[in-house]
Structures are given as structure tokens and as C-alpha cells.
């Protein structure tokens, strides 16, 4: 493979309304740094040649949100659109995987987001020494009853994403994370849709972490002061917001998280943790393309500036 190094380009793959991307770009503009923004929710032309000679320019890519729209919007209404979306998915994954072999520094990505498996993350986190809630995945009522007898207080939540759909007159949305009570058992048949259940862990605080290339930005969330957010801070109380403050993660927990993320080959993500009254950290989940703007603002971390400076530094280094 022949490699020809040329001028470096910073490329940002995001969405047109992603505010944190706007702020990172504002820093780049202020420094007069060249970049290319690709809004994934807007159709973009694309051509790629696979040949014996692969000419590679050095690139710095920050894949912030989603994936590239390679099918024109006019064909979205076609009955075979799902087949075309499958092919679009293959091309997007090819673009990312190919870039990993090039002279490219790549932050974030689409592949991990698209195949993200929270259950496997729990399994891996446990293997790397992180404490996780006891978890049951089942579609059997008797198994669920036995699990509740062991843990007494248990919760359920979506295995992947919140369910939301519209009928003619209503919008239906799943309630997120909630406690399982006796009334719920009365509604279940012996076999039901495959679901996840976890022991309920008492919290002192909840912790949201944003991770970027070895750096941790952590925030304590005082969700226990509000009955509405006590089970999960994402059951937001918009009238009375939780209190947020910066939080310094323990070195031991950071070391375990780094090993876990290195194994998954992730260099940026959001992480949800619990700190128990016994001062134990409990891992809940990661989100490869998680939001961090609110964390940055509430804790005055200026993460957007940090990312811009990192992109500029890499751009200067790879251009030499």
C-alpha cells in the first residue's frame, strides 16, 4: 500500500442541530483551523475507490453523532427503503473501519453505537472488576418471582432504547426505569416479552462521566433528594432540577474503566455510575455517543474547548 502524506484535515461527523459540535467548531474558527463538517442528518454525496494504490492524507476525525446519510431524501418513501438502509449501514461501517487502517486519528464512531449491547457491557464490566447490579434477562414469570424473592426490591428498564410510537389518537412511550411491584406480576402471563430486571441499589449519588481519550469529566447528581428522580435521575423533574456538582473519580475506578474501554476499543463515551452509601462505585452503562453538553455547562468543564484543543494538537502533530 502506497501512503502519501499531505495536508491534514479535521473532519467532524455530527448532526445539524448538535450544539456541542457548534461550540467545538467556534473554537476551531477562532484559531483559524481548517475543518470539514458533515451533518449526518443531511444527504451528502460520496464516492470511494478501492484499488491497489491507496493514497492517504492524514486526517483527524471526530465522529460525534449518528452516521452519514448516503441515500437521497426523495427515496425515503420507497417501499424497499429498509433494504437500502441496510446497504447504507454497510457503507458507513466500511468508511469507519477503513479509516482505522489509514493515517487517521479517529475519535468516537458509528460502529460501536450501532451494535451497542448494554447487556454485554454489564458482563464485560464485571469481568474487569467493576461492581454491577445483579441482573436477570428473562421472559419467564416464575424466574422473575424467584429473582424478586432474592433481592426484594428490583427495577426494570429498556434493554436497548425507550419505546415510543404514535397511533391515530395517542403517543405511547415507555416509562423508563421503574420499580417492579406486585401489581405488575398480576399483569404478566407465564411467558412475556424478553426483558431485563436488576436489583435496586441504594444510592448516595448518581455520577455521569464523559470520557475522551484518557480524560475523565465527572459530575455528581443529587437525585436522591427528589422522589421523582430517586430511582433514576433520567426520570427528570423539569420544575425542580437536581443539584449537579463536579466530582473527582477515584484512581482505582478510573483504572478499571480504562481497561474496560480499551478492550472495547472505545476512546470516547458517556458513563453512568452509582456511589452507594457504603462508598462503593457501581457501573450501570455506557453510551458511545452520549450527550455531554449539560455536564460541561453545569460543572464549568468547557469540554468543547478541550476537544477543540485536542483536535488542533493532533492536527499539528500529524502534519509535521
Image (spheres, rainbow, N blue to C red):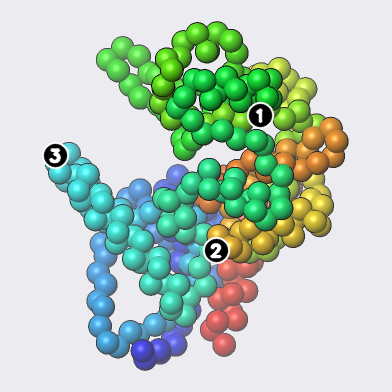
Q: Which residue is mark 3?
A: 79
Where does the image place residue 8, in percent across and percent down from the top left?
Answer: 48, 79
Q: Say the numbered circle drawn on residue 199.
A: 1
Q: Is residue 215 positioned above or below 125 on the image? A: below
Q: How many marks?
A: 3
Q: Residues within 10 Å of mark 3 (few under 14, many from 20)?
A: few
- Residue at x-position 27% and y-position 55%: 88
Q: Left or right: where does residue 6 sit relative to residue 269?
A: left
Q: Secondary structure at mark 3?
A: loop
Quarter holding residue 94: bottom left
Looking at the image, residue 97 sits to the left or right of residue 32; the answer is: left
* Residue at the left extreme of this rendering: 79
- Kindly state the secondary structure of the residue where label 1 is placed: strand
Say the numbered circle drawn on residue 265. Answer: 2
Residue 70 visible, this angle: yes
Instruction: Point out the tag, 1 or 2, that comes first from the N-terminus.
Output: 1
User: What distance separates the C-alpha of mark 1 from that of mark 2?
Assistant: 29 Å
Q: Where the C terminus falls, by quadrant?
A: bottom right
297 left or right of 279? Answer: left
Q: Quadrant of the N terminus?
A: bottom left
Write the residue at 14% across / 39% down. Answer: 79
Q: Residue at x 63, y 67 (%)?
A: 310
Residue at the location (32% across, 50% down)?
A: 42
- The picture places residue 125, in percent across and down from the top left corner, at 64, 50
**Element assignment for label 2:** loop
The image quadrant that residue 291 belongs to is top right
Q: Earlier in the sequence, mark 3 or mark 2?
A: 3
Measured as percent of width and height from the top left, residue 111 is found at: 42, 57
Placement of 267 over or under 73, stated as above or below:
below
Amino acid at each position: 500500500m502506497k501512503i502519501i502524506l499531505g495536508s491534514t484535515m479535521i473532519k467532524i461527523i455530527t448532526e445539524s442541530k448538535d450544539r456541542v459540535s457548534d461550540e467545538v467548531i467556534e473554537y476551531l474558527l477562532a484559531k483559524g483551523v481548517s475543518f470539514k463538517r458533515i451533518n449526518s442528518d443531511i444527504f451528502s454525496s460520496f464516492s470511494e475507490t478501492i484499488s491497489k494504490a491507496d493514497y492517504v492524507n492524514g486526517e483527524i476525525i471526530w465522529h460525534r453523532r449518528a452516521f452519514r446519510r448516503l441515500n437521497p431524501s426523495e427515496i425515503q418513501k420507497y417501499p424497499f427503503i429498509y433494504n437500502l438502509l441496510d446497504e447504507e449501514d454497510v457503507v458507513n461501517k466500511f468508511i469507519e473501519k477503513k479509516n482505522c487502517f489509514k493515517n487517521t486519528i479517529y475519535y468516537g464512531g458509528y460502529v460501536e453505537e450501532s451494535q451497542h449491547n448494554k447487556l454485554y457491557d454489564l458482563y464485560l464490566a464485571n469481568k474487569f472488576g467493576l461492581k454491577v447490579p445483579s441482573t436477570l434477562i428473562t421472559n419467564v414469570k416464575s424466574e422473575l418471582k424467584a429473582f424478586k424473592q432474592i433481592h426484594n426490591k428490583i427495577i426494570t428498564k429498556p434493554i436497548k432504547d425507550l419505546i415510543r410510537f404514535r397511533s391515530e389518537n395517542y403517543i405511547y412511550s415507555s416509562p423508563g426505569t421503574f420499580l417492579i411491584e406486585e401489581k405488575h406480576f398480576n399483569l404478566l402471563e407465564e411467558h412475556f416479552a424478553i426483558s431485563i430486571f436488576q436489583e435496586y441499589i441504594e444510592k448516595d449519588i448518581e455520577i455521569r462521566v464523559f470520557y475522551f481519550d484518557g480524560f475523565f469529566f465527572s459530575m455528581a447528581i443529587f437525585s436522591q433528594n427528589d422522589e421523582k428522580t430517586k430511582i433514576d435521575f433520567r426520570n427528570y423533574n423539569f420544575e425542580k432540577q437536581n443539584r449537579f456538582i463536579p466530582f473527582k473519580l477515584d484512581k482505582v475506578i478510573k483504572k478499571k474503566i480504562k481497561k474496560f474501554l480499551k478492550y472495547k476499543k472505545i476512546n470516547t463515551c458517556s458513563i453512568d455510575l452509582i456511589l452507594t452509601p457504603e462508598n462503593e462505585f457501581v457501573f450501570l452503562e455506557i453510551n458511545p455517543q452520549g450527550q455531554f453538553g449539560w455536564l460541561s455547562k453545569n460543572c464549568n468543564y468547557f469540554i468543547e474547548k478541550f476537544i477543540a484543543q485536542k483536535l488542533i494538537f493532533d492536527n499539528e502533530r500529524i502534519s509535521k
